Image: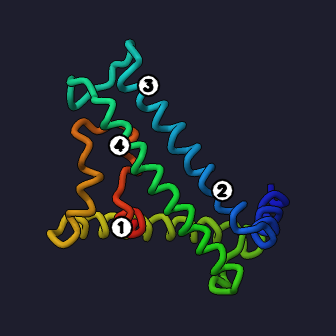
């Protein structure tokens, strides 16, 4: 397992930007479509589902197309931002970033992961609150355009909102 982590570090250091962008885009899209399709099937298609829905109205196909379109735009922006961070790492902007937990020990690695997740969750909450203010609600309207929320609305963001998140 540790050899694989080191291989990832070496691959990131040597791969071309379009290849890295494509890999990032495909991995995010695979997770999004896999989870969204599974959730949609479970909550909306599966006749044996005992899931409680907020609405019993049928979903318009245009809504799902809209959610998938904006989500795909967001995924492309996410991939671009991650690629920019990888490039910054390549040029030494993140000197303390490491991929091998044995470098500093598992406790430091797990501690960093927990702190990262807590800070990221706090930042997501704060930006979401900011997007509900009158100055930014125009951008957040795309996310709330889904009349009946579906799993496909997960990344349904205006490009400005996608960048902020």
Q: Earlier in the sequence, mark 1 or mark 2?
A: 2
Residue at x 23%, y 56% (from the top left corner): 141
Q: Earlier in the sequence, mark 3 or mark 2?
A: 2
Q: Position of residue 37 (x, y in %)?
A: 48, 32
Q: Nearer the viewer, mark 3 or mark 4?
A: 4
Q: Is residue 6 left or right of residue 141?
A: right
How far is the residue under mark 3 from the one under mark 1? 30 Å
Q: Is residue 41 left or right of residue 26?
A: left
Give residue 66's mark: 4
Residue at x 39%, y 50% (from the top left corner): 70
How far is the residue under mark 3 from the one under mark 2? 27 Å
Q: Position of residue 38 (x, y in %)?
A: 48, 30
Give residue 160's mark: 1
Give residue 22's mark: 2
Query: Secondary structure under badge 2?
Result: helix
Mark 1 packing: few (<14 Cα in 10 Å), some, or many (20+)? few
Which quadrant holds residue 4? bottom right
Query: Secondary structure under badge 4?
Result: helix
Q: Position of residue 144 (x, y in %)?
A: 24, 50
Q: Nearer the viewer, mark 3 or mark 2?
A: 2
Which quadrant holds residue 12? bottom right
Q: Earlier in the sequence, mark 1 or mark 4?
A: 4
How far is the residue under mark 1 from the one under mark 2? 21 Å
How far is the residue under mark 3 from the one under mark 4? 18 Å
């Amino acid at each position: 397992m540790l050899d694989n982590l080191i291989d990832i570090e070496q691959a990131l250091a040597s791969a071309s930007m379009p290849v890295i962008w494509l890999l990032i885009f495909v991995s995010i899209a695979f997770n999004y479509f896999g989870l969204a399709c599974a959730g949609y099937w479970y909550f909306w298609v599966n006749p044996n589902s005992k899931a409680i829905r907020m609405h019993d109205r049928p979903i318009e196909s245009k809504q799902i197309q809209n959610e998938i379109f904006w989500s795909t735009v967001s995924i492309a922006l996410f991939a671009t931002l991650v690629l920019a961070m990888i490039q910054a790492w390549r040029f030494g902007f993140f000197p303390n970033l490491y991929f091998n937990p044995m470098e500093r020990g598992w406790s430091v690695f797990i501690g960093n992961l927990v702190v990262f997740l807590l800070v990221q969750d706090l930042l997501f909450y704060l930006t979401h609150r900011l997007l509900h203010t009158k100055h930014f609600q125009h951008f957040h309207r795309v996310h709330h355009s889904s009349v009946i929320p579906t799993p496909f609305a997960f990344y349904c963001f205006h490009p400005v909102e996608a960048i902020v998140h």
